[in-house]
Amino acid sequence: MKRITFLLLFGLFLLAAVVPGCKKEEITNIEYSVIWKGSLETAPANPEAGWAYYNTKLGQSFIYDGASWQVMSENGKDGKDGKDGKDGKDGQNGLGLVWKGELEAAPSDAETNWAYYNSTEKKSFIYDGTTWLVLAKDGAQGEKGADGENGKDGTNGTNGTNGNDGASFVWKGELDANPTEPQTNWAYYNKTDKKAYIYDGEKWSILAQDGKDGENGTNGTNGENGNDGTIIVWQGSLTAAPASPAKGWCYYNSTDKKSYMYDGTTWQMIAQDGQDAPIPVTGITLNKTTAEITVGGTETLSVTSVLPDNATDKTYSWSSTNTSVATVDADGKVTAVAGGTTTISATANDGSGVSATCTVIVATVVTWNSSDISGQGNTFTKDGVTITAAMLDFNDKNFLTSGTITTTLGNFTKIEVTGADYTNMGSGWTISNKKATWTGTASSSVNFGNGGSMDGICGMGNDVTFVFTIEVQ
């Protein structure tokens, strides 16, 4: 193994790697500079002399001497188990009891520690030498347990033998005589002899025939003569009853839309206009079909059209399929309650069942302030979100070279970082005035940095804030 002159400069290298400004100063008196590659499962490819890393599988740190990887340090071993404590003192002996069985009343001439179950009171008693004390009593009837799952379906029975194929026929309709040049399975109804025929390839055979008429039933008894009718004299369409009416006069009242007849004393209604049939709603349109709101936020939906324009009842009602995610009021105002997805519907009140829907996704927001970000190593996790970087400086809030932001809550729809400098953030990121914003395709994992030593997020000791918008799954 080549001799490497560290002179405690490896410790100084670690300090130099995290100084403010993310600058790496040259260290003298060593044969080559140490370049720390972070925590990895295997050795990095194409190493150069002075490269060093921690192997997470082996629990050892290695440095490359230009020819091979050499061990620098390794995790300590666990200490030996301590000695067992002394045994505790024995407890006092319990009392023995004499069980007298199930009785309707206490047994006579009782002795100490006699016990029995009183079937009348549903309690167990023990005699302490003076009185009977309750030992136990029947518990209340428990609630019925949940129904068990249905058993598996039984095996299907064997299929029956296929029946013979039926013969199809071509119906030629009702005719006065046989159709000419018939083909096999032609069929028709003969209007002359009241029979249906089918052609079997050689001759016409009867397929069916009309049934005979039944005998006439006995005549019923004549009904009583009706009252003489009244001769009607139509007076036309009027706005009010005509004056000096005679019996039998009739008119249509154009004001109340009813027809009347005068019976000699009063005007009697004989008919009235029918009501128009209601015109149902056939379609409803909303201003949005999808919407995303953060927890605690609101979104107002509106109905842009109800068809047809002459529908009898064009009113509608709002509803949410999951009020634990979002609620909606009578005016279409949606309020986000918790992360998740719900469907908001506007349904016609006329009973037609017509509705329009909007899928509402309620996203949760996770915020990290600079004071929240602390620890050691290359990873930090808080509130279901984790950031990992090849070079992570918790003091200056630097996340350099390359890294990944992941969540167990669902999918990121937006990530905002403010207060830092940014270099080569990668796909989906935009940078403006100390602010980096990611708005790519919703995903549970977002990358940043392209591998350069200064790529990524460089906090420089400033107040850095992360805001994560997440669609909860």
Image: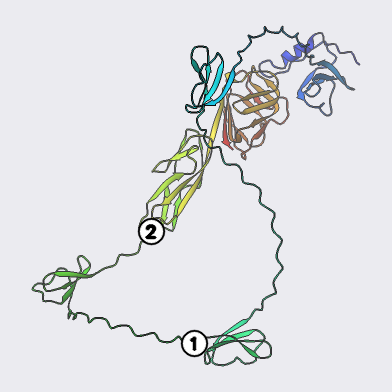
* Vertical relation: 28 (above or below) 144: above
- Mark 1 residue type: Lys
Locate residue 81, reporting x and y percent.
76, 11
Q: Is residue 222 above or below residue 10?
A: below
Residue 144 in the image: state x and y as whole percent.
Answer: 53, 37
Observer able to see residue 50: no
Displayed quadrant of residue 178:
bottom right
Q: Disc 1 on helix, strand or loop?
A: loop
| Callout 2: SS | loop
Q: Is residue 23 left or right of residue 320?
A: right
Which quadrant is home to the N terminus? top right
> In this view, which residue lies farthest toward the left?
244
Q: Give the quarter of the image for residue 435.
A: top right
In the image, 174 versus 437, the foreground residue is: 174
Classify residue 398 by image quadrant.
top right
- Residue type for callout 2: Asp
Any mark on residue 212, and which?
Answer: 1
Which residue position holds label 2? Answer: 309
Up the image or down, 399 lies above or below 287; here it is above
